[in-house]
Image (cartoon, grey):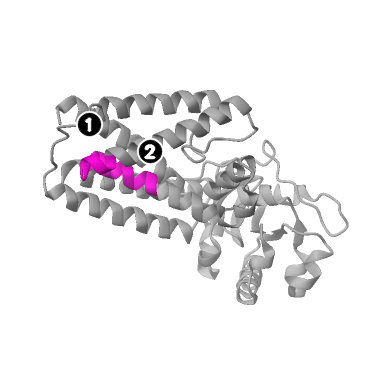
């Protein structure tokens, strides 16, 4: 396989690998996009599998990208890549003609493309595939070490998916990402009397617990959330329990009186955007979102005390720098394994 063809294959692989990683970083968001595709193609009966399908497709995309970069199983990977690109292109042609109000989700929340841009992007990837594999002969053989490279990258992608499934995205690109001012991007919620209480999130130190699917919270989850709410209140935080429900529907959840008094009601889509974790916590200071936690990793009393003692801007910057370094380190590691090993 000549050098030009390998370069085209590597570029195609890099794009697919990055696209797969960005979707694996946000399984909940990827599931939402998949749900939109299922609705558009009248497959809503499969909506319960949307997150599994989205993560499976993203993992396949990432693994295929890693295989293209490392050059393993070249003929098999070429055929698999061609089939995937044909499917993607057919779907984007249909979307371009129909123009539904939905995002392609090609790169998760990081890059948003309209249907024309998505079609052009896929046609460009089709051209790269053609340059890399037509004619499909003399593709050459990889060095044996490249099978080790691919295996390490594949294992890393699987562990990255597991990590992402148990946490919130390392890098947040939603409308309610850290640094967002709620005065510019409002968070709407109302109390048991159906009176909007948005102003409660716009002053002082607020810990907003959000449950976009409260019925899936176990008694143990509610106990941990209640304990967190108690500790946060003792540290001087305003606690808000935002749920996707109604005042009538929340009565059967068995909330303790203290948590029930702090319960407010909001739209499911807003809660999903605020925090990808069902029962996760978002720290808001004077209407600015500072940091988020997944439900399994809620801050304890010592953490809350440390937060109170740290300037919110410094706290946000420190956390963002750390998560950025972790994500960039992961990307560099995967590419280094594939390209240098």
Q: Residue at x 56, y 42 (%)?
A: 174
Q: Left or right? Give the position of 9 relative to 198.
A: left
Secondary structure at numbered mark 2: helix
Residue assigned mark 2: 83
Quadrant showing the N terminus: top left
Q: Residue at x 44, y 48 (%)?
A: 57
Find out whether residue 322 is within the magenta segment.
Answer: no
Q: Left or right? Give the position of 226 relative to 107.
A: right
**Magenta part mainly helix, strand or loop?**
helix
- Find residue 205 and report its horizontal and vertical position in percent: 64, 54
Magenta range is 60-77
Q: Left or right? Give the position of 302 relative to 275.
A: left
Question: Is the residue 155 above or below the residue 81 in the image?
Answer: below
Secondary structure at numbered mark 1: loop
Q: Residue at x 43, y 43 (%)?
A: 22
Residue assigned mark 1: 136
Quadrant for residue 228, please give it.
Answer: bottom right
């Amino acid at each position: 396989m000549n050098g030009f063809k390998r370069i085209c294959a590597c570029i195609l692989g890099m794009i697919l690998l990055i696209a797969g990683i960005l979707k694996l970083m946000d399984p909940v968001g990827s599931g939402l996009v998949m749900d939109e595709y299922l609705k558009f193609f009248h497959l809503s009966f499969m909506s319960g599998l949307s997150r599994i399908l989205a993560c499976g497709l993203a993992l396949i995309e990432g693994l295929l990208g890693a295989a293209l970069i490392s050059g393993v199983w070249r003929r098999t990977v070429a055929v698999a890549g061609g089939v995937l690109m044909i499917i993607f292109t057919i779907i984007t042609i249909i979307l371009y003609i129909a123009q539904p109000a939905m995002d392609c989700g090609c790169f998760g929340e990081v890059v948003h493309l309209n249907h024309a841009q998505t079609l052009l992007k896929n046609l460009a990837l089709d051209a790269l595939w053609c340059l890399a594999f037509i004619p499909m002969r003399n593709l050459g053989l990889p060095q044996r070490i490249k099978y080790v490279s691919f295996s390490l990258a594949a294992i890393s992608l699987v562990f990255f998916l597991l990590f992402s499934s148990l946490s919130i995205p390392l890098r947040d690109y939603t409308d309610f990402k850290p640094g967002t001012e709620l005065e510019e991007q409002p968070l709407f919620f109302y109390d048991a009397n159906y009176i909007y209480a948005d102003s409660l999130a716009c002053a002082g130190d607020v810990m907003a617990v959000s449950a976009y699917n409260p019925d899936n919270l176990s008694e143990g989850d509610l106990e941990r959330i209640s304990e967190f709410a108690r500790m946060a209140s003792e540290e001087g935080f305003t606690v808000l329990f935002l749920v996707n429900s109604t005042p009538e529907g929340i009565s059967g959840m068995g909330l303790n009186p203290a948590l029930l008094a702090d319960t407010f009601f909001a739209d499911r889509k807003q809660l999903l955007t605020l925090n990808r974790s069902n029962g996760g916590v978002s720290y808001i200071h004077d209407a600015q979102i500072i940091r988020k936690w997944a439900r399994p990793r809620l801050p304890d009393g010592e953490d809350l005390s440390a937060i109170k003692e740290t300037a919110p801007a410094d706290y946000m910057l420190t956390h963002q720098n750390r998560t950025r370094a972790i994500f960039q380190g992961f990307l560099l590691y995967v590419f280094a394994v594939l390209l240098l090993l």
